[in-house]
Amino acid sequence: FSFLQERLSCVLALLLLLHSTDSFYVPGVAPINFHRNDPVEIKAVKLTSSRTQLPYEYYSLPFCQPSKITYKAENLGEVLRGDRIVNTPFQVSMNVEKKCEVLCNFPNKPVILSVEQSKLIAERIREDYYVHLIADNLPVATRLEFYSNREEEEKKKEKDVQFEHGYRLGFMDGNKFYLHNHLSFILYYHREDVEESQEHTYRVVRFEVIPQSIKLEDLKADEKSMCTLPEATGSAPQEIDPTKENQLLFTYSVHWEESDIKWASRWDTYLTMSDVQIHWFSIINSVVVVFFLSGILSMIIIRTLRKDIANYNKEDDIEDTMEESGWKLVHGDVFRPPQYPMILSSLLGSGIQLFCMILIVIFVAMLGMLSPSSRGALMTTACFLFMFMGVFGGFFAGRLYRTLKGHRWKKGAFCTATLYPGVVFGICFVLNCFIWGKHSSGAVPFPTMVALLCMWFGISLPLVYLGYYFGFRKQPYDNPVRTNQIPRQIPEQRWYMNKFVGILMAGILPFGAMFIELFFIFSAIWENQFYYLFGFLFLVFIILVVSCSQISIVMVYFQLCAEDYRWWWRTFLVSGGSAFYVLIYAVFYFVNKLDIVEFIPSLLYFGYTALMVLSFWLLTGTIGFYAAYMFVRKIYAAVKID
C-alpha cells in the first residue's frame, strides 16, 4: 500500500495549495479610492426568492425612483442570471453620517400605494422575496446574530455572526403583511496609508443593512426631509393592507465605521457564510475513499489481466486445440461498429466539448479569475468556451465516425453541432416562455436569444465543421484485431449484466465522491448563495474523471468476459450512471430543502435539473467511453491472435 500513501501525501499537498488560492484577487479589478464627502453610489440588482426562483427587477415594485433611471450595460452572464443593475435615489457620501432621511416625497405628502401595488407588495412578502443592492460592487448583507448552544460558549455569552444576502422585503405576522420601509445602512471603510501632506483616501470594504418596519405616524419628519426614529420599544411596524390604499414613507440612515479589513479581503465576509469545516472533512474523506477503492480496483484488474494474457499466450504456444474462453473469444467481433454510429460519435463530440469547457472554467476560476466580484463572468466564460471548444468536439467526433466506418461526414458534423445544443436551446426556450409570462427579469430578452443563436450558428457550427473535417481526414483509430465477416452469437446473459443494473452499480462510486460538493452547488444555484470553492471543485473533478474511467474499465471487462461484444453504446450509457443518482438527489433536494409549491417554479427547477443531468451524463459517459476504448485496444493488442 505504499503507492496509496504516496497518493494521499500528493492529495494533501494539493489541498494545502488549493486552500491558499481561496481569497485571491484578479489583476485588473482595480479598487476605487474615495475622499471624504465623495458620493458612494448605491445601485439595485434585483429581487429574488428561493420559493419562486423567479427574479424581478427592482422597480417592478413601487419603490422610490430617481429623476432619471439608468440601467448598467450588462454582460451575457448577468442577463442570463436575471440581474438588472439600476441606479437608486439613495444619497450616500463617504464617511458622512445620516441620522434619518426621507427618500422621496415630502413628509407632509407620503407615498400612496394603490390597491394593485399593495396587493403586489403583499404577494412578494408572502413569497419571501429579498432585495439586493450594491455599493462599490459589494452586495448588501443582513447580519444575523445568535447564541451558540455549546456550554463553554454560553458562559462567555459570545454571539455567532452570520450574514444573509440582501435584506427581506418585509415579514408576516399572522395574516398581516409588514413592509421594511426604513433601511439603516452600515458601511465599513478601510483608511489607506498616504503621505502626510495628502488627503486621506478610503475604500469600501463591507456593506450591511438593518431593515426596519416603522409606521408612518411614528416617523417624525420635518420640512427638510429629516426624520427622527422612534424608540425601539414603542414603535409599531408599517402594515400593508392588500385590500385598500396604503400611505407610508420610505426612509434611510447611513452609518460609517472604520475597519481593519483590507480591500483585497473584502469578499471574505460573503464567502464564509457556510461551515468550511464540513467541506474540508468531506473532501478529504472522499479523496481517501476514492483513491483507496481506485487502488484496489487497479490492483485486481491488473493482476487478473496479466494472468489472462499470460494464459492466452501460453495456450497458443503449447496447445492450439484447447478451447478459447473469456474475453479472447470475442476478438473477431469486439471492434464491430455499433448501431447508429453517427449519433454515438455526435454525443461523444458534445461530451468532449463539455469536458474541455468545464476543465478550463474550473481551472481559471480556481486561479481566482472568475471571482464573485466580477458578476456574470463565470456564465459568460462558460458560454463562449463551449462555442470555441466545438473544434475539439468536431475533431474527436469525426475521427471516431471514420473509425466506425461512417461515410457521410457533413451530416455527421451537422448532427454533432446541433444535437446536444439543440436540446438545450429547446428546453431553455420553453422555460423562457413561462418566465416571460410571469414578467420576471430572469427571462432572457429576445435580442440576447438572437445573439446566442448567432453565436451558435456563426461560431460553434463552423468550428465543429472545421474540427470534423480534420478529424475525418485523419487516420482512423488503429484497432489491433480484424473483425470477422459473420457476427458471432451472444450467449444468454446473467441478470446482473442487465444495462439498468450496470447503470446503478457504476454510478455509486463517482456520485459518492462528489455529492457533498453537489450540495454546495445546488445551494448556490437555488438558494442564492455564492459558490467560490473552485479549488475543491477542481479536485473533485479530477476524482470524478479517475473514478468514471476505472468503473468503466471494470464494467467493460466483465461484459467482454461474458462474451458480449456490444460494448460501444453500453459503455457510454453505463459510465454516465452517476447522472441517474444526481437526478434522484435533485428530487430529494427539492422535497427536503426547498420550499417551492407553485407550478412554474417547480417546472423551472425540474427543467434546469434535466439539463444538468443530461450534461452530466454526456460528460461522465464520454470520460468512461474513451477510458474503456483505450483499455479494449490495449488488452487485445497484448494477446497473440492467429
Image (spheres, rainbow, N blue to C red):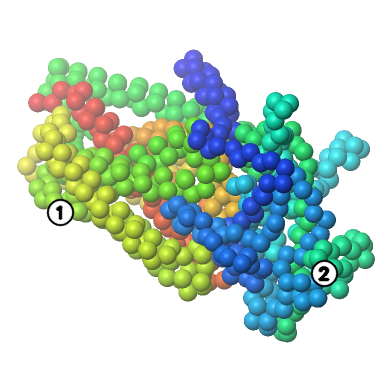
Query: At x 64% / y 54%, what residue is drawn?
Result: 42
Query: At x 19% / y 18%, what residue is drawn?
Result: 314
Can residue 305 be seen? yes
| Label 2: element kind | loop
Q: Is residue 357 left or right of residue 154?
A: left
- Residue type (three-letter) at the residue carrying disc 1: Lys
* For residue 535, above or below residue 524: above
| Label 1: element kind | helix
Viewer-side residue, 629 vs 215: 215
Crowding around mark 2 (Cα neighbors within 10 Å: few <14, some 14 to 19, many 20+) is few
Crowding around mark 1 (Cα neighbors within 10 Å: few <14, some 14 to 19, many 20+) is few
Label 2 or label 1, whichever comes before in sequence order: 2
Task: Tell me, yes or no, whether the two marked residues, 2 and 1, touch with CB atoms within 8 Å.
Answer: no
* For residue 97, above or below residue 237: above
In the current view of this chain or complex, which residue is farthest to the top? Answer: 2
Query: At x 89% / y 63%, what residue is drawn?
Result: 230
Residue 469 appears in which quarter of the rendering?
A: top left
Residue 128 in picture, x, y percent from top left: 67, 65
Residue for badge 1: 411
- Quadrant where the image shows the C terminus: top left
Can residue 564 be seen? no
Query: At x 73% / y 65%, what residue is drawn?
Result: 103
Viewer-side residue, 38 vs 445: 38
Label at residue 176:
none
Viewer-side residue, 38 vs 564: 38
* For residue 537, above or below residue 194: below
CA–CA distance between discs 2 and 1?
A: 75 Å
Residue for badge 2: 223
In the current view of this chain or complex, which residue is farthest to the left? Answer: 485
Viewer-side residue, 60 vs 145: 60
Residue 449 in picture, x, y percent from top left: 37, 62
